[in-house]
Image (spheres, rainbow, N blue to C red):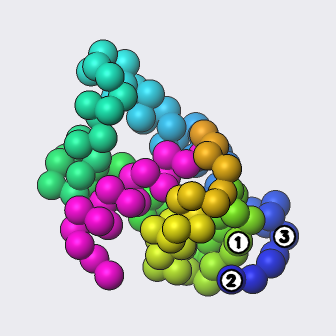
Amino acid sequence: WSTMNVDDPELRPTKEFLVNILLRKYVDLYSKTKTNRRDILPLMCADNPVGQSLMKDIEDHIGGAKTRCFSCNFFFGNATEYYEHLLTFYHLHESPFQLLDLISIVVNVQKKHLALP
């Protein structure tokens, strides 16, 4: 973990991606299903096309870029370090729950469902 300029446009994920792309896709999904939010969580699993699509969007957006966690204000050298951080107790329980945490939910459901280290 290191500190960098949070406004660096080269860092991923960008706020625009989190709010205007990932969140919009989730809202569209929620409005189409018209169910409880808890019923959407199983759709995010790795064996479900919805979860696969959300995770692919995240992976395509991040690519090989340096990453940051808005909630915890940490910076990482690559996507793997970022995903590992999103699975940590600190990120999940110590950082304030924010709207941007949709990415945490998707990555956690995808990575834990796949049982990846």
Instruction: Reply above or below: 114 against 103.
Output: below
Amino acid at pointer 3 = Asn
Q: Which residue is mark 2?
A: 1
Q: Which residue is mark 3?
A: 5
Are circles 2 and 1 on residues that touch, CB within 8 Å? yes
Q: Is residue 47 left or right of residue 25?
A: left
Nearer to the camera, 102 or 60:
102
Measured as percent of width and height from the top left, residue 19 is found at: 60, 40
Circle 1 crowding by C-alpha within 10 Å: few under 14, some 14–19, many from 20: some
* Residue depicted at 32% across the width and 56% down the height: 109
Camera-side mark, 1 or 3 = 1
Q: Which residues are magenta?
A: 100-117
* Residue depicted at 36% across the width and 49% down the height: 54
Q: Earlier in the sequence, mark 1 or mark 3?
A: 3
Q: Which residue is mark 1?
A: 74
Please say whether residue 53 is one of the residues in the magenta stretch. Answer: no
